[in-house]
Amino acid sequence: MNVTDEEAESRLLREVVPVVVPIIFGIIVTVGLFGNGLVVLVVSCNLQMRSTTNLLIINLAVADLLFIIFCVPFTATDYAMTIWVFGDAWCKIVQYLVFVTAYASVFTLVLMSMDRFLAVVLPIASMGVRTERNACLAILCTWSVILVACVPIMLSHGEVRHHANSTAVSCMFLDSQLNQIPDGQGYNYPAFQITFFVTSYVLPLLVIIAMYLLLLKRLWLGVVPGGHMSAESLRGKRRVTRMVVVVVVIFAVCWCPIQIILVVRSLNKYPITEASVLIQIVAHVQAYMNSCINPILYAFLSENFRKAFFKVIYCAPRQQAAAGGRPQRASEMRPLNDTKTTRSTLVNGNKESVHIL
């Protein structure tokens, strides 16, 4: 009996996807948990690395950790199984946390861009604003607004039966036109998805791009209000800004395909074929990889993070052994941010502390 190419491809999707995709997502979870956990540990345990930018990096790592824990495993389950087995309440909670952590990630990037903008464009005037206390307040306010604003997401998701007489259910958006829901009891899925696309992707990236255009103009001119930056300060600001820009660009690239696919699907313009399913899988994997790639970027782009990573993984046991099992005295410890990482430059008679990641 001859097997057509379409039948072979369909069988490949049925047999391979439920196995391979969860394995890929499992790798993402493992790498993401280790990398982001290491970032939180490194910055939290080293007082020398405390700065507004690094506090925001911790917040981004926490958001990525929560996204990895509450989103990736259940998306993998959706590909491995055809039904939702975790109950209606957990369906609502998971969907709520998915959107909360997604918003937290992108708006942390907005805060990081604002921090870089103030540090470069208004270095003197922003010294009283760019403090650890204000960074913590900004993070707290951001999370509070997101947690409250996303409550409707919990109400608009739930279990939906596959058929009227079926016991099999899926965790889905409650849309009366898409699902087995009486008219008047559902929500508008296209409006919801387009709103999410605009508020979690388009508008934040437009704000970030606008700030970086102004920032880069000032940065590459090397001018501060009333004078010129020192060469040391300029190089430091360029390194930190380059890292933040790369993180933002990677985020935009990773999330663009799945955001567009979700909007097109909500408009019933995305045909369900073997090819389209594979494209969606690749887009999902690409988006979720963003949650585990940031620690790798820090390691490649930041000398301080590389040193701190190696110190946590390798150096602490060796240092204690070298000291004969006794803890090192403060006078014996070398700070992570040495003369290469924290410098004070005099700008118009005012000291400007330059923290270089």
Image: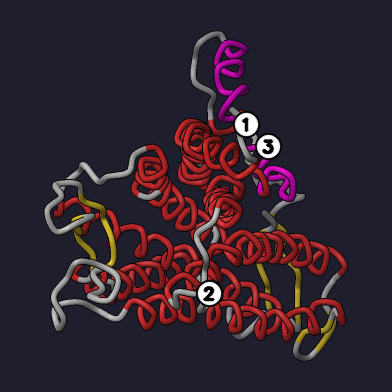
Residue 38 - label: none
Nearest to viewer (mark 1 / mark 2): 1
Judged left or right of residue 69, residue 160 is left
Q: Nearer the viewer, residue 133 or 283?
A: 283
Location of residue 290 in the rendering, given as x and y in whole percent from the top left corner: 57, 52
Vertical position of residue 317 compared to residue 164: above or below: above
Which structural element holds mark 3?
Answer: helix
Location of residue 353 in the rendering, given as x and y in whole percent from the top left corner: 66, 66
The C terminus, quarter of image: bottom right
Q: Residues within 10 Å of mark 1 (few under 14, many from 20)?
A: few
Residues drawn in magenta = 298-323
Please indicate, yes or no, whether residue 42 appears anywhere in the rendered image: no
Location of residue 138 in the rendering, given as x and y in whole percent from the top left corner: 41, 73
Give the mark, 2 or 3, whose residue is nearer the N terminus.
2
Please indicate, yes or no, whether residue 243 appears anywhere in the rendered image: yes
Query: Hey, what amino acid is under mark 3?
Result: Lys
* Residue at the spot of label 2: 201
Which structural element holds mark 2?
Answer: helix
Q: Would residue 243 be counted in the magenta stretch?
A: no
The N terminus, quarter of image: top right
Q: Quadrant of residue 351?
A: bottom right
Which structural element holds mark 1?
Answer: loop
* Residue at the spot of label 1: 2
* Residue at the spot of label 3: 307
Q: Quadrant of residue 323?
A: top right
Location of residue 10 in the rendering, given as x and y in whole percent from the top left corner: 53, 42
Q: Would residue 300 be counted in the magenta stretch?
A: yes
Judged left or right of residue 218, residue 291 is left
Nearest to viewer (mark 2 / mark 3): 2
Give the mark, 1 or 2, whose residue is nearer the N terminus.
1
Residue at the image position 17 percent from the left and 71 percent from the top = 181
Question: How far apart are labels 1 and 2 at the CA level?
Answer: 47 Å
